[in-house]
């Protein structure tokens, strides 16, 4: 016998008996009626039907038990019920009580192939590194609170950009200057046309020169300085002036098509995707920019804001450091005057006369000593360093005589696993600003 030969009602009775037996309890008509919330007279009729089909051992006023065939059929029915409830709870974030009620109804109408596919989907969600339990919890939060960029920045980042294991590629080869694939070419075209209409309504029609600048910016998904935009715009239209670029970028920023970012004394522009939040790593030596996203940072920021009864509107995190290519170059050794504020370095050698070498050694600047650069341009080019608990100021010539190697004293900000799962970035080599 198969469960398809049973009516939905009889399947419920058989499953109820199985559940009661699983709890090591004795099944009686009264208990079955209470479990299914039905009249005792209905239970008596159903038990007789199940007994006639050879699925239960039943006699009036005696304990009810399942036959071997009944156990097989009941186990299959209960398994389908649990799979459906599991899907409703884990995937659709339905409340357990509501999931239980709906599972009781759905188990009678869903085909085996559909149930198998639901089971496979739940298994996929639990094993796939792109989803997991956090993904399911995020969906539950979405059901409760609706879509909110601050709550789901990682989702918008993945949906709007080309994701993957790019961290090692860019950090290992920051010479790469290919931009990420465009988020949506048709959308960008629509934005440009819509901008023209909006400006035309306010008698601010775009000039041919401004349209050239916009085309250059929109067709390059990279961080661009004013000089880079000007140079590329002139290749399309030689009459473009710096003033044209400045005015056009102000318009794009005003209409939230672009946004400007300041890194130390440099200003760059990037496409503004309000649905796609990310933060930046900035190399203070070569100007490489790495975009990254980490849900742990977003969660901590949100928690701190809520703890202070503060409603976040926007935020931007820029981390300053040294990229992998520059670190590799540093490992070959350099002079102390080439170090940057905040670096920890270890002295490799001192290339000076004996008197200067002894003087520096007495100050604590001997080979093997770990020092920290407090200021790389103090008092007209002097270098201020921390040696143990002492502060020393070295003139430029002395600093050039001290050879050092980079010493990493800080923990990694992001594990490789985090970067693979949640990372979207571009590394641009930025030329020094030209005054035009």
Image (spheres, rainbow, N blue to C red):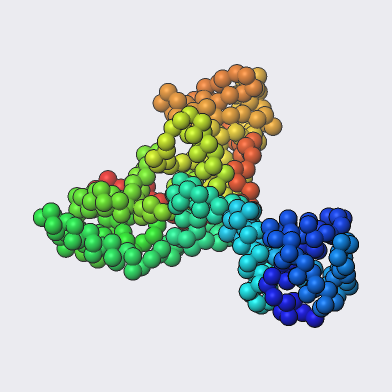
| Left or right: residue 169 compared with residue 70 | left
| Left or right: residue 225 compared with residue 64 | left
Q: Measuring 50% from the left and 39% from the top, which residue is drawn there?
A: 302
Q: Measuring 58% from the left and 29% from the top, which residue is drawn there?
A: 372
Among the 4 quarters of the image, the one containing residue 70: bottom right
Question: How many dots with numbers?
Answer: 0
Among the 4 quarters of the image, the one containing residue 221: bottom left
Please state which of residues 17 and 179 is positioned toward the viewer in this rendering.
17
Q: Measuring 69% from the left and 60% from the top, which residue is drawn there?
A: 38
Q: Position of residue 304 (x, y in %)?
A: 51, 33
Would residue 64 be seen by someone viewing this image from the given angle?
A: yes
Q: Position of residue 213 (x, y in %)?
A: 25, 59
Please state which of residues 293 and 7 is positioned toward the viewer in this rendering.
7
Please state which of residues 243 and 420 is positioned toward the viewer in this rendering.
420
Q: Position of residue 246 (x, y in %)?
A: 23, 49
Looking at this rendering, what residue extends furthest in the left direction?
203
Question: Which quarter of the figure is the N terminus placed in?
Answer: bottom right
| Left or right: residue 372 compared with residue 43 | left
């Amino acid at each position: 016998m198969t469960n398809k030969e049973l009516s939905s009602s009889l399947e419920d009775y058989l499953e109820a008996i199985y559940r009661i037996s699983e709890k090591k309890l004795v099944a009686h008509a009264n208990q079955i009626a209470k479990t299914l919330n039905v009249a005792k007279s209905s239970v008596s009729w159903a038990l007789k039907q199940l007994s006639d089909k050879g699925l239960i051992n039943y006699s009036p006023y005696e304990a009810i038990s399942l036959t071997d065939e009944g156990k097989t059929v009941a186990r299959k029915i209960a398994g389908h019920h649990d799979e459906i409830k599991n899907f409703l709870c884990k995937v659709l974030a339905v409340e357990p009580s509501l999931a239980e009620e709906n599972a009781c109804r759905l188990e009678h109408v869903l085909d085996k192939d559909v149930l198998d596919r639901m089971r496979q989907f739940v298994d996929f969600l639990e094993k796939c590194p792109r989803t997991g339990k956090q993904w399911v919890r995020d969906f539950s939060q979405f059901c409760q609170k609706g879509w909110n960029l601050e709550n789901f920045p990682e989702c918008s980042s993945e949906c709007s950009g080309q994701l993957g294991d790019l961290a090692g590629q860019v950090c290992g080869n920051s010479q790469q200057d290919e931009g990420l694939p465009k988020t949506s070419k048709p959308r960008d075209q629509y934005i440009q046309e819509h901008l023209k209409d909006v400006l035309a309504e306010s008698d601010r029609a775009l000039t041919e020169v401004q349209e050239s600048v916009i085309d250059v910016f929109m067709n390059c998904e990279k961080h661009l300085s004013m000089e880079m935009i000007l140079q590329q715009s002139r290749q399309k239209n030689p009459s473009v002036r710096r003033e044209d670029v400045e005015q056009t970028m102000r318009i794009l920023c005003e209409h939230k098509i672009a946004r400007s970012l300041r890194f130390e004394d440099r200003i760059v522009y990037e496409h503004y995707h309000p649905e796609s939040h990310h933060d930046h790593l900035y190399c203070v030596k070569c100007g490489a920019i790495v975009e990254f996203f980490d849900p742990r940072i977003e969660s901590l920021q949100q928690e701190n804001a809520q703890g202070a009864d503060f409603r976040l509107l926007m935020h931007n995190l820029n981390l300053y450091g040294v990229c992998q290519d520059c670190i590799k170059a540093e490992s070959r050794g350099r002079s102390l005057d080439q170090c940057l504020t905040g670096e920890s370095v270890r002295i490799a050698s001192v290339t000076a006369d004996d008197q200067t070498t002894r003087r520096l050694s007495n100050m604590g600047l001997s080979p093997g000593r770990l020092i920290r650069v407090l200021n790389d341009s103090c008092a007209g080019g002097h270098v201020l360093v921390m040696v143990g608990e002492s502060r020393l100021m070295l003139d430029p010539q002395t600093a050039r005589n001290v050879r050092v190697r980079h010493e990493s004293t800080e923990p990694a900000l992001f594990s490789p696993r985090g970067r693979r799962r949640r990372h979207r970035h571009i590394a641009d080599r930025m030329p020094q600003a030209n005054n035009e």
